[in-house]
Structure formats: C-alpha cells, structure tokens
Image (cartoon, rainbow, N blue to C red):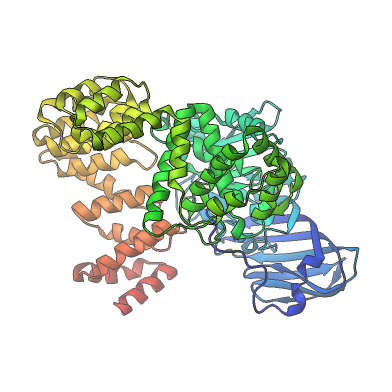
Amino acid sequence: MKYILLLLLIYFYIPINAQHQDKVDFIRGNVDISIDPKQETITGTVTYQLTALQKVDSVFLDAQNIQLIETRLNNKKVKITNSGKNIIVHKTFKANKSYTLKIKYVAIPKQTVYFLGWSDDILGNEQVWTQGQGKYTSHWLPSFDDMTEKVEFDLDITFDKNYVVIANGDLLGTKDLDGLKKWRFNMEKPMSSYLLAFSIGDYHKKQILSNRGVPIDLYHYPSDSSLVEPTYRFTKDIFDFLEKEIGVDYPWQNYKEIPVRDFLYAGMENTGTTIFSDTYVMDSIAFKDRNYVNVNAHEMAHQWFGDLVTEVDGSSHWLHEGFATYYALLAERELFGKEYYYWKLYESAIQLQELTNKDGGETLIDPKASSLTFYEKGAWALHMLREQLGEENFRKGIQQYLKTFEFRNATVDDFIKEMELVSDTDLGVFRNRWLEDKEFPFSEAKTSLVRESEDLRNFFSLQREVMTSSTDNESIIKRYWGSTKSDQLKSQIIKIYFKSMSENFLSEVLGSNNVMVRQAIAISVGQIPLGLKSEFESLLEDESYVTKEAMLYKLWINYPSDRANYLDKTKNVIGFSNRNIRLLWLTLALLTKDYEPNNTNDYYVELSGYTSPMYTYEVRQVAFQFLEELIGFSDENLLDLINGTQHHTWQFRKYSRTLLDQLLEKKEYRERIDRLKVKLNEVELRYISNKLISE
C-alpha cells in the first residue's frame, strides 16, 4: 500500500482546546450504517465508548463533509462544532470517567468509498468498496485521521439482500429487513480506523483453514469459480509459513481476501480483510507469467507489520512496507527456492543503485520517500540486519518487538531498541548505513549476494569474464550455460547477452521446453534471425501470455506474407484480464490487408467498444492506445475518454486527461468534442467547458 502524505493530527483551524486528544482514549466503536449505492450516500450511527485520562473541555473526531443529524453524550444532547473536516464536542470531560458518544450522520463520500456499476444496465458488475489509505475513513465515518488512536470496531451494514457484504471481523449473523439485509460484524481487538473496511458485490466464497484452524475466506465472482485455485494458489502455505517464520500467532479472528474492480493499488491490508485488484484473478497460464503470490504474501504480512503494530507517523513507514516486502520475499523463497529470493534482491538492488546514481537516493526515515525506497530498500535493510544479528537473534527481536507493541504504535527507534536489547548489539552503524544514508550500499549488497547465491556468483563471474577476457563472448556464455541448471540464470544471460548468441546457439536454446527461458528469448530478441523462423513461430504455442503477445507482434512485423497464419493461430486467445492479446489481435487483424474482410466491421466494433466504462480501466487504456496510434476515435470513444477524465483511479484519470489535452490541440477533435457536450453529465460538462475556454 502506498501512503500519500505524512499524517496530520489536527488541522490548523481547530481551536486550541480541541488538541487535548492524547488525554482521551476511545476504546470501542459500534458502527451501524445503511448504504444507498445509487445515491452514493451512507446514513449511519456510530457509538463510541471513551475514557477521559485527564480533565479536558472538549474532544474531536475527524469527519470529512459529513452532515450531522444528532450528537449525544451519555444520552444527552451536547454542543458541537462541525467544521466540515472535524467534529468538536464541547463538554468538560472529567478525569478517569467513561463516556458514551453517539453520532447520527449522513455522508456523501467523495473518496474512500467507491460505487461501481450502479449507473449502467449490466447486471452483476455492481460493487461498493472502501480504501482508507492511511487516514481517509473519516470520509464515511466520524473517526480518526490518526493511526495512534486504536479502537475495537464492530460494524453493522444494511444493504440490498441480493448482494454479499464483507467487512472486518466475524460475521455474527444477518437479519432480513423487507428487501434489505443487515450484516453484523464483530472485531475483538483494537485497530487504527484507516483499516476499517467493507466490500459489497456479487461474490461466492471458498473457505480453507490454516494449520492452526484460522478460517481463510477466498472470495470470487460467480463466473470465476475455475480461477479460484490458480488465483489463490499457495494461500494456505503462505499463511502457515508466516506464522511459523514470524513466531507470533496471526492476531485476528479470521482472514478474508476480496477481489474488486478498478482498485487503486495492487492490494490493501485492512485488518483481517485484504481487498485486492481483480486483475490478479487469473488462470493457470497467467500464473506462470505474473501471479498473486507476492501481493498475497505482502498484504498478509501486513497483518502483523502495520495492523498489529502500526507506525506512529510517516517517518516510520519502513515498519509497514519494508517489513511486508521482506516477509513476502521470504514466503516466495519458501515456495520457489533460495535462488529465486536472491534474484529478486538483485533486481531491486539494481533499481536502487540506479536511483542513487541519479542522485535520487532517499533515507528510510524520510516520510516523503518513494515506494521503491520504503519497499525495496526497506526489505534490503532487514535482509542485512538478519545477516548481522544471525537467525536466532533476529527472530527473537522480531517477536519481542511485536509482543511489546501489539495493538499499539511504534517508531523506528522503538524497533531498533528491541533488536539491540535482544541481541546485545549496538545498531548505530547499521542505522546510519541502511536507514539514514541516502545512498544504497550496493557494494555491501553485492557482497551478500555473492556469499549466499551460487547463481549470482556465476553471473558476476560471467560479467567479469566478458568484460576482461579475450575469448569470444559466446564461448564464455556457453561454458556458463552448460554448467548451470538454473532457469533464472539462463534467463538473465539471454536478456543481457542475446546479441552475442549465434543462430545455432539460439536454436539449441529454443529447442528446450522451458517456458521461462523461451519467454526471455521472446522478449529480448527484436529482429528474428532468418534461419530460425520456425523455431520462433513455435513460441506462439507456449503456455505464456507474455510470450504469445510478444511473438504475435514480432512475427507479424517480420513476416508480412504469413500474417494471416499468425492471426489464425491466436484468434481465440484473450490473455490476461486486461485482454492484452485480444486487443493486439484485433488491431493487427484490422491492419492486415484482406484478412477476413467480411468481419472487419465486427472487429472494429469490438476493439472500439473496449473503451467503454463497462470494462476495467486497464482494458480501456490499452484500447485507447491502439485506437489513437492506428485507427482514430469515434464519437463514442471520445465520450468514453471524457468519462475517463473523472475516473477514481489516478493512473487512468491522468492518462485520459493527458490524451484529451493532446486531442484538443487538433481543430478537428476540438470541434467534435464541442458538439458532444450535449451528451455529457454535469461533472463532465463542467470539466470540458473549462478546457475549451482555456485552450
């Protein structure tokens, strides 16, 4: 998960007497909400149990654009101020006394809660889901934009009975309410409010149990029952491994995983309830190319590192992302082997070194550091700390840290202190080198890799020989190739040295049945050698969507006379969930002269239709790219593009706005877009009108 800003506890305009929040402890929150997806509103009540630790004259909650209906303190009306960002309760709170604060409200969230599919005519694609992201739950619930306020939340949700409602905690039961249904969820332990979450949609569920008997619920769309196994492959193994490796029992009652459409990130580790992008829902072929395993392990590791023990502020974000990245790598090491782990570390080391070389290095305690720093440099820091302290001390330190700060917050200093106490080691040098220094210590990282990985020892030795030996490159490469059985090493050799490989050597390599090695050739080689046409054509048959896509395009470019044959072979291949191969196929079919002329219009209609909001933003964006480069846009495509400028995912919104700006520079498109204004909704019309005026 990517946190966006350093957390702010109190806004500058809040009266000074509202800043005594550390003198009040919110213990429990009972939330009862009713969701209207078509109006995109949430009506609810939240009842907090709190204790005043010292005498204070007011308390506050964060509430973004929430309309208050009634506020009661100990069942009596109380004076409040609603600034539009905060609710301030004006009342003298006596030390060591408990209070009940009940707030009735209506929220129209502009972010954090996302309503998908309710305005179209497509049945079954409707969803509602949350993404609190650090501090934004206050957009739908009066709560706390502060990770240090930990509360035990229980959540009741009333919704259309035809859908499935999923939220944190145990489902205690449901109650039918005249076409609606109330779902009741109970949490047993406190958490930061940004980790409160729900997801609603058309779902089926498969439940598995961990070795300790913890229920793990794997949700999927009804149409994706055949994809459950490859999507969630190794989930139980990862869960059991993390419990054993970390040495602290999973801290929550159960674990749920829910795919959603057009999620903002890969996944989000809400307490016991991971929501992830449905682009990771895949078949067994896609699993070989890119799978959910790393994201699955990363979000699961967050249940300890981030959820059980939470950072105090952004300067300690390493305690979340670096730890989750590291333990996800350890899980992959358990599943895929030692060398896989070290190749992953090497790949991130190269990225971090490049960042350093560009004077972009960052410290791990910089709250504004990039994801590359928090995730990858953070994982490297833990890898090196483990090497320094040894396995036993490292594990004992991790366990002591988690037990000391469980259901609380911690800083980097807190973590370092626990590791020093357990190991009786001064970690000052480690802290300076790995946490505070902006530069990535590549030489130290390389030494670690060479010491631990046979693959990387051979790889670095090969690089050295190629640079210094008078022997021809292919002879050197062949010698190393013949002495290893490592697919990772062979793939790396191809990616870097394929230009030094003769046709005979490439033919020999292509003769293998290794999908990973053959994929490396498909990706790396641009101009197909004349004598290897049939060998490269065989790559179209590989069970790899990456390989199929690369080879369909390259063969189509290299051999114009055989284009129809290549299109025939791949006619029914869809590819990943983003329809990568199908979109490419449609484009190439339209560009191939005399290819199925009776179907040309159907192919154009299909390709053009993929810009529609009924598809995921990944599909829409690729369709826009192909249409822009090769065919052009219909009026419907332009309306879809304008729709994209208001999309909730920043990536697609930015892409759509950039493309629209480019089109508006052309008179033809500017005039067409101006004529289409009558078909826009209010938000789109306002955006386009401003664009047309400013141009």
Q: Quadrant of the C terminus?
A: bottom left
Seen in the picture, residue 657 relative to 336 is either above or below; the reply is below
Coordinates of residue 297 in the picture (x, y in percent): 55, 37
Query: Would residue 689 be visible to someone looking at this image?
Result: yes
Seen in the picture, residue 271 relative to 500 is either above or below; the reply is below
Q: Is residue 511 left or right of residue 378?
A: left
Query: Would residue 175 be visible to someone looking at this image?
Result: no
The quarter of the displayed image where residue 68 is located:
bottom right
Coordinates of residue 629 in the picture (x, y in percent): 21, 54
The residue located at (77%, 45%) in the rendering is 188
The quarter of the displayed image where residue 688 is located:
bottom left
Count of numbered labels shown in the rendering: 0
The quarter of the displayed image where residue 499 is located:
top left
Coordinates of residue 244 in the picture (x, y in percent): 66, 30
Q: Is residue 518 left or right of residue 342?
A: left
The residue located at (33%, 32%) in the rendering is 461
Q: Is residue 265 left or right of residue 537?
A: right
* Nearer the observer, 104 or 320: 320
* Nearer the observer, 584 or 633: 584
